[in-house]
Amino acid sequence: MKITTGLFLSSILASWVLSIVGEEQVTEKFPCYFPAIYNFGDSNSDTGGISAAFYPVISPCGETFFHRPVGRGCDGRLMIDLVANHLGLPFLSPYLDSVGANFSHGANFATGGSTIRRQNESVFLNGVSPFPLDIQVLQYTQFKKRTSWHYKQDNKGSERTVLPRPEDFSKALYTFDIGQNDLAVGFRTMSNKRLKAEIPDIINQFAKAVRVRRIFSSRSVQTRGKVILDTQHRPHWLLASDHTRSSKKPGKFDHHGCVKAQNDMAKQFNRLLKHKVNKLREKLPLAALTYVDLYTAKYKLIGNANKQGFLDKGKICCGYHEGKVHVWCGNKAKVNGTKIYAGSCEDPSLYISWDGVHYTEAANHWVVKHIINGSFSDPQVPITHACYRH
Ligand SMILES: *[C@@H]1O[C@H](CO)[C@@H](O)[C@H](O)[C@H]1NC(C)=O
Ligand SMILES: *[C@@H]1O[C@H](CO)[C@@H](O)[C@H](O)[C@H]1NC(C)=O
Ligand SMILES: *[C@@H]1O[C@H](CO)[C@@H](O)[C@H](O)[C@H]1NC(C)=O
Ligand SMILES: *[C@@H]1O[C@H](CO)[C@@H](O)[C@H](O)[C@H]1NC(C)=O
């Protein structure tokens, strides 16, 4: 009995598709068995990929939980870490990491700055990752192939203890948390009107990467498959520079202080993604796909910051932001002739925003707590039951 599960996490949207083979209907009383997680995404779920490939993430990142920088743009754990723990699995090793990686329970293909579409930009120019979604999926395909090869050699050597069992691929949970940077690049390089017109293509490329590379194709999901889809788009309320630049323009912000035009774009993206996930369910009758609406979850958190035990929503824990001067978290700079270090706040657990772009562990925790029971999912099933197709 095999189950293929895909979990796509996007900050604004999430969907689940579950597929069942044959007539057999699975009783939903039993939690799914997920031996592994395969994650695809950007910095919101990068557990060390970009650090392994390029520059290491620097201190004070990691200070809250790991007590050292561990490749995450956060003071502690990311949502994907908390979801893995919730399912009884260890933290995911980045696929690109050549030191101490252990893939026996899955692998993480996410890298900070990743997009769905291939961009004509570079990590050196704009921080855009050279590993867009289609490349991440290719890496996955290669990973799977090579793992199977090692097993076929009946290799009793060391490789096996750091690789998943080939039969686990079809039972794994696949999560996708990507798309935010496609919009970010769009806001930087094109008009809102043009970007809006590009969204269908971005969504199509997302679906293509998922389908064509055969993660959830009917061939790889022969038996039973479950997929959770979740794409990530944060409410764009944290861009301090954006606030200053446009504070004179009335109507730019909504009642929570979020940048309205950007959030409208994110909502449009999510609408189309949700629609596409529905279509994918028809095309992938053997997969279980879940769409998780991270946007609404995060917006709810931001809108009720105080009530949920956080300081004012606009406060940033790490970095230096005074007037027009912005020094990124962990960096040093000279301001008015004085050397400053853009360190972190005293108590990150009171902040929603870690560095102005990424969330704190406390905020990630809040979001995960609110999404794992399925209340922001379509269909509304707990993540532990995402393998069942509804
Ligand atoms: C990148 O450039 C090529 C060739 O000019 C163009 O066809 C493509 O649409 C561009 N991609 C993006 C995401 O802008
Ligand atoms: C990798 O992780 C698995 C499961 O946690 C463990 O059994 C195995 O010993 C680990 N391999 C190495 C080389 O640490
Ligand atoms: C730098 O000095 C100017 C002039 O005294 C002052 O207006 C500004 O606020 C200072 N900037 C910072 C970041 O302290
Ligand atoms: C899901 O969990 C959250 C956080 O614990 C809770 O507020 C919410 O009521 C739960 N929803 C359902 C449908 O159980």
Image (spheres, rainbow, N blue to C red):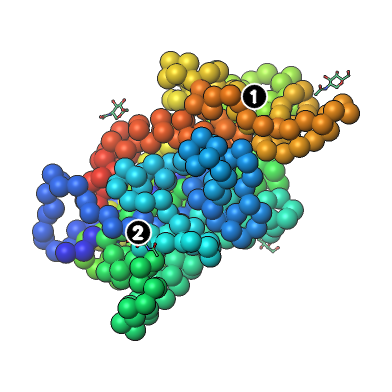
The structure residue drawn at horizontal position 48% and vertical position 68%, both measured from the top left corner, is 138
Q: Residue at x 55, y 56 (%)?
A: 49
Residue 136 in the figure: left or right of residue 261:
left
Residue 219, position as x, y percentages in the image: 30, 71
Q: Is residue 125 visible?
A: yes
Q: CA distance from mark 2 to mark 1?
A: 45 Å
Q: Quadrant of residue 384?
A: top left
Q: Disc 2 or disc 1, which is closer to the eye?
A: 2
Residue sticking out furthest to the right: 337
Give whichever of discs 2 and 1 has the lower sequence position.
2
Q: Position of residue 300 (x, y in %)?
A: 43, 25
The relative height of residue 76 versus residue 154 in the rendered view (above or below) is above
Q: Are marks 2 and 1 in contact (CB under 8 Å)?
A: no
Q: Which mark is residue 252?
A: 1
- How many dots with numbers? 2
Image location of residue 234, percent across then percent down: 52, 36
Task: Decide if ligand 2 comes within 8 Å of the CB at mark 2.
Answer: yes
Left or right: 288 in relation to 45: left
Q: Quadrant of the N terminus?
A: bottom left
Residue 117 seen in the current view: no
Q: Residue furthest top?
A: 307
148 versus 183 height, above or below:
below
Q: What element does badge 1 sit on?
A: loop
Amino acid at pointer 2: His
- Decide which of 264, 350 is in the foreground and name it: 350
At horizontal 51% and vertical 44% (from top left) the residue drawn is 44
On the image, numbered disc 2 is attached to which residue?
Answer: 105
Q: Is ligand 3 closer than 8 angstroms to the Cβ of mark 1?
A: no
Q: Which mark is residue 152?
A: none
Q: Tell me which amino acid carries mark 1.
A: Lys
